[in-house]
Image: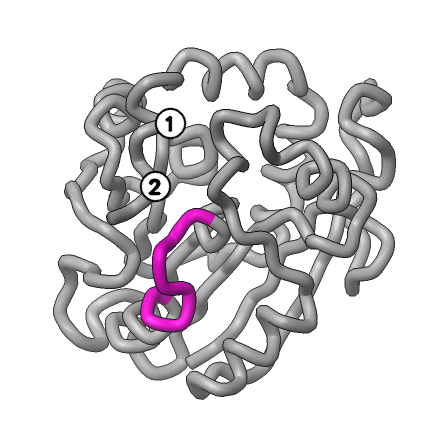
Protein backbone atom coordinates (compact mmCIF):
# COMPACT_ATOMS: atom_id res chain seq x y z
CA UNK A 1 0.00 0.00 0.00
CA UNK A 2 1.31 3.47 -0.78
CA UNK A 3 1.98 5.64 2.27
CA UNK A 4 -1.17 7.69 1.71
CA UNK A 5 -2.71 7.95 5.17
CA UNK A 6 -0.62 10.89 6.48
CA UNK A 7 -1.41 12.89 3.35
CA UNK A 8 -5.12 12.12 3.60
CA UNK A 9 -5.25 13.16 7.25
CA UNK A 10 -2.79 16.05 7.28
CA UNK A 11 -3.29 17.72 3.92
CA UNK A 12 -3.46 21.19 5.48
CA UNK A 13 -0.27 20.62 7.43
CA UNK A 14 1.40 19.61 4.17
CA UNK A 15 0.19 22.79 2.46
CA UNK A 16 1.30 24.93 5.41
CA UNK A 17 4.87 23.64 5.07
CA UNK A 18 5.16 25.49 1.75
CA UNK A 19 3.86 28.69 3.33
CA UNK A 20 6.19 28.43 6.35
CA UNK A 21 9.22 27.54 4.24
CA UNK A 22 8.41 29.75 1.27
CA UNK A 23 12.01 30.38 0.20
CA UNK A 24 13.06 26.76 0.54
CA UNK A 25 10.10 25.83 -1.65
CA UNK A 26 10.93 28.50 -4.25
CA UNK A 27 14.56 27.32 -4.28
CA UNK A 28 13.44 23.72 -4.91
CA UNK A 29 11.14 24.95 -7.67
CA UNK A 30 14.04 26.74 -9.38
CA UNK A 31 16.26 23.66 -9.14
CA UNK A 32 13.58 21.48 -10.78
CA UNK A 33 12.92 24.14 -13.44
CA UNK A 34 16.62 24.09 -14.39
CA UNK A 35 16.42 20.47 -15.58
CA UNK A 36 12.77 20.14 -16.65
CA UNK A 37 12.29 19.87 -20.44
CA UNK A 38 10.71 23.01 -21.91
CA UNK A 39 8.42 21.13 -24.27
CA UNK A 40 6.77 17.77 -24.86
CA UNK A 41 4.08 15.86 -23.04
CA UNK A 42 4.86 15.14 -19.41
CA UNK A 43 3.34 14.21 -16.06
CA UNK A 44 4.23 14.45 -12.40
CA UNK A 45 4.19 11.21 -10.40
CA UNK A 46 3.05 11.84 -6.84
CA UNK A 47 1.70 15.24 -7.88
CA UNK A 48 0.38 15.91 -4.37
CA UNK A 49 -1.45 19.22 -4.19
CA UNK A 50 0.15 20.45 -7.42
CA UNK A 51 2.72 22.68 -5.68
CA UNK A 52 5.30 21.86 -8.36
CA UNK A 53 3.21 20.84 -11.37
CA UNK A 54 1.10 24.02 -11.42
CA UNK A 55 3.90 26.63 -11.50
CA UNK A 56 5.97 24.44 -13.84
CA UNK A 57 3.12 24.15 -16.36
CA UNK A 58 2.63 20.38 -16.00
CA UNK A 59 -1.02 19.62 -16.67
CA UNK A 60 -1.13 15.91 -15.83
CA UNK A 61 -0.44 14.11 -12.56
CA UNK A 62 -0.71 10.74 -10.81
CA UNK A 63 -1.57 10.73 -7.10
CA UNK A 64 -2.86 8.03 -4.69
CA UNK A 65 -4.23 10.50 -2.10
CA UNK A 66 -7.75 11.73 -2.85
CA UNK A 67 -7.38 14.65 -0.42
CA UNK A 68 -4.21 15.86 -2.12
CA UNK A 69 -5.59 15.33 -5.63
CA UNK A 70 -8.58 17.49 -4.78
CA UNK A 71 -6.34 20.54 -4.29
CA UNK A 72 -4.24 19.73 -7.37
CA UNK A 73 -7.40 19.70 -9.49
CA UNK A 74 -8.29 23.14 -8.14
CA UNK A 75 -4.87 24.23 -9.39
CA UNK A 76 -5.84 23.14 -12.89
CA UNK A 77 -4.15 19.74 -13.06
CA UNK A 78 -5.75 16.62 -14.46
CA UNK A 79 -5.09 14.04 -11.75
CA UNK A 80 -5.34 10.28 -12.29
CA UNK A 81 -5.58 8.19 -9.13
CA UNK A 82 -2.72 5.74 -9.13
CA UNK A 83 0.70 4.76 -7.79
CA UNK A 84 4.23 5.08 -9.13
CA UNK A 85 4.68 1.28 -9.36
CA UNK A 86 1.74 0.91 -11.76
CA UNK A 87 1.50 3.98 -13.96
CA UNK A 88 -1.71 4.49 -15.93
CA UNK A 89 0.10 5.26 -19.20
CA UNK A 90 0.94 3.21 -22.30
CA UNK A 91 4.52 2.22 -23.16
CA UNK A 92 6.68 5.00 -24.60
CA UNK A 93 3.90 7.59 -24.40
CA UNK A 94 5.47 10.53 -22.52
CA UNK A 95 8.40 12.86 -23.17
CA UNK A 96 9.20 13.47 -19.51
CA UNK A 97 8.19 12.53 -15.97
CA UNK A 98 8.75 14.46 -12.77
CA UNK A 99 8.97 13.04 -9.23
CA UNK A 100 9.54 15.50 -6.37
CA UNK A 101 10.07 14.00 -2.88
CA UNK A 102 8.02 11.03 -4.11
CA UNK A 103 10.70 8.36 -4.33
CA UNK A 104 11.08 8.25 -0.51
CA UNK A 105 7.39 7.33 -0.10
CA UNK A 106 6.88 4.61 -2.72
CA UNK A 107 6.66 0.98 -1.58
CA UNK A 108 9.03 -0.33 -4.27
CA UNK A 109 11.46 2.32 -5.57
CA UNK A 110 13.02 0.07 -8.22
CA UNK A 111 9.63 -0.93 -9.61
CA UNK A 112 8.56 2.73 -9.67
CA UNK A 113 11.65 3.70 -11.67
CA UNK A 114 11.16 0.76 -14.05
CA UNK A 115 7.60 1.97 -14.65
CA UNK A 116 8.91 5.45 -15.41
CA UNK A 117 11.36 3.92 -17.89
CA UNK A 118 8.54 1.96 -19.53
CA UNK A 119 6.26 4.92 -20.16
CA UNK A 120 8.97 7.30 -21.38
CA UNK A 121 9.69 7.61 -25.08
CA UNK A 122 13.25 6.81 -26.16
CA UNK A 123 15.23 9.95 -25.34
CA UNK A 124 12.60 10.93 -22.76
CA UNK A 125 13.69 12.26 -19.38
CA UNK A 126 12.94 11.41 -15.76
CA UNK A 127 13.52 14.29 -13.34
CA UNK A 128 13.76 13.35 -9.65
CA UNK A 129 13.89 15.95 -6.87
CA UNK A 130 14.67 14.68 -3.37
CA UNK A 131 16.33 15.45 -0.05
CA UNK A 132 19.73 13.74 -0.05
CA UNK A 133 20.03 11.43 2.96
CA UNK A 134 23.66 12.46 3.51
CA UNK A 135 22.88 16.20 3.57
CA UNK A 136 22.26 18.36 6.67
CA UNK A 137 18.47 18.46 6.14
CA UNK A 138 18.44 14.76 5.20
CA UNK A 139 20.26 13.85 8.42
CA UNK A 140 17.90 16.04 10.44
CA UNK A 141 14.85 14.31 8.89
CA UNK A 142 16.36 10.89 9.62
CA UNK A 143 17.09 11.78 13.25
CA UNK A 144 13.64 13.30 13.84
CA UNK A 145 11.57 10.94 11.68
CA UNK A 146 9.42 9.79 14.62
CA UNK A 147 8.26 13.37 15.15
CA UNK A 148 7.02 13.79 11.56
CA UNK A 149 3.65 12.50 10.42
CA UNK A 150 5.02 12.45 6.86
CA UNK A 151 8.58 11.15 7.19
CA UNK A 152 7.98 8.47 9.82
CA UNK A 153 7.66 5.80 7.10
CA UNK A 154 9.86 7.41 4.48
CA UNK A 155 12.98 5.83 3.03
CA UNK A 156 15.64 8.41 2.25
CA UNK A 157 18.20 7.95 -0.51
CA UNK A 158 21.67 9.32 -1.05
CA UNK A 159 22.40 10.70 -4.51
CA UNK A 160 24.82 7.80 -5.14
CA UNK A 161 22.17 5.21 -4.30
CA UNK A 162 19.64 6.74 -6.67
CA UNK A 163 22.20 7.02 -9.48
CA UNK A 164 23.09 3.33 -9.05
CA UNK A 165 19.42 2.36 -9.23
CA UNK A 166 18.81 4.52 -12.31
CA UNK A 167 21.86 3.03 -14.07
CA UNK A 168 20.72 -0.50 -13.22
CA UNK A 169 17.40 0.18 -14.95
CA UNK A 170 19.06 1.60 -18.07
CA UNK A 171 18.92 5.37 -17.64
CA UNK A 172 21.88 7.42 -18.84
CA UNK A 173 23.09 11.01 -19.55
CA UNK A 174 22.71 12.25 -15.99
CA UNK A 175 22.53 15.92 -15.11
CA UNK A 176 22.49 16.94 -11.44
CA UNK A 177 21.85 20.22 -9.64
CA UNK A 178 21.52 21.11 -5.95
CA UNK A 179 20.10 23.82 -3.71
CA UNK A 180 19.23 24.48 -0.01
CA UNK A 181 22.62 25.20 1.53
CA UNK A 182 21.30 26.19 4.98
CA UNK A 183 18.99 24.74 7.62
CA UNK A 184 15.31 25.13 6.75
CA UNK A 185 14.62 27.77 9.38
CA UNK A 186 17.65 29.79 8.26
CA UNK A 187 16.56 30.11 4.61
CA UNK A 188 15.30 33.69 4.24
CA UNK A 189 15.70 34.14 0.47
CA UNK A 190 15.79 32.02 -2.66
CA UNK A 191 19.00 29.98 -2.59
CA UNK A 192 21.25 29.51 -5.62
CA UNK A 193 21.07 26.42 -7.81
CA UNK A 194 24.51 24.89 -8.38
CA UNK A 195 25.61 21.98 -10.56
CA UNK A 196 26.47 18.66 -8.93
CA UNK A 197 25.70 17.41 -5.43
CA UNK A 198 27.34 17.07 -2.03
CA UNK A 199 26.68 20.56 -0.65
CA UNK A 200 22.97 21.25 -1.05
CA UNK A 201 20.31 19.26 0.79
CA UNK A 202 17.85 19.24 -2.14
CA UNK A 203 19.15 17.46 -5.24
CA UNK A 204 17.58 17.12 -8.69
CA UNK A 205 18.68 14.38 -11.08
CA UNK A 206 17.74 14.35 -14.76
CA UNK A 207 18.11 10.90 -16.32
CA UNK A 208 17.50 10.01 -19.97
CA UNK A 209 16.02 6.80 -21.37
- Is residue 75 a member of the stretch shown in magenta? no
CB atoms of marks 2 and 1 within 8 Å: yes
Q: Residue at x 42, y 54 (%)?
A: 98
| CA–CA distance in space, label 2 to label 1 | 7 Å
Q: Nearer the viewer, residue 17 or 194?
A: 17
Q: Residue at x 34, y 65 (%)?
A: 112
Q: Residue at x 53, y 84 (%)?
A: 167
Q: In this view, does 122 lie to the left or right of 147?
A: left
Secondary structure of residue under mark 2:
loop
Q: Nearer the viewer, residue 103 or 117?
A: 103
User: Which quarter of the figure has residue 71?
Assistant: top left
Q: Mark 1 points at which residue?
A: 6
Disc 2 crowd rating (10 Å Cα; few below 14, some 14-19, many 20+) is some
Spot occupied by residue 23 in the image (x, y as percentages of width and height): 71, 23
Spot occupied by residue 165 in the image (x, y as percentages of width and height): 52, 77
User: Which quarter of the figure has residue 30?
Assistant: top right
Secondary structure of residue under mark 1:
helix
Spot occupied by residue 203 in the image (x, y as percentages of width and height): 68, 54
Q: Which of 65 and 117 is in front in this view?
A: 65
Q: Residue 42 carries which label?
A: none
Disc 1 crowd rating (10 Å Cα; few below 14, some 14-19, many 20+) is some
Task: Provide the residue span drawn in magenta.
Answer: 105-112
Q: Name the residue under label 2.
A: 3
Q: Residue at x 28, y 40 (%)?
A: 59
Amino acid sequence: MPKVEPFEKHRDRYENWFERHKYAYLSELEAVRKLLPKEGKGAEIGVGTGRFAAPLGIKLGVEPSKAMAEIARKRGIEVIEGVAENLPFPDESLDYLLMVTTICFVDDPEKALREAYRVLKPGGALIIGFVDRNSPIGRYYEEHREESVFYRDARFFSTEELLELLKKIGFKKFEIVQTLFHKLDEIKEVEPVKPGYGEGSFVVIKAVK
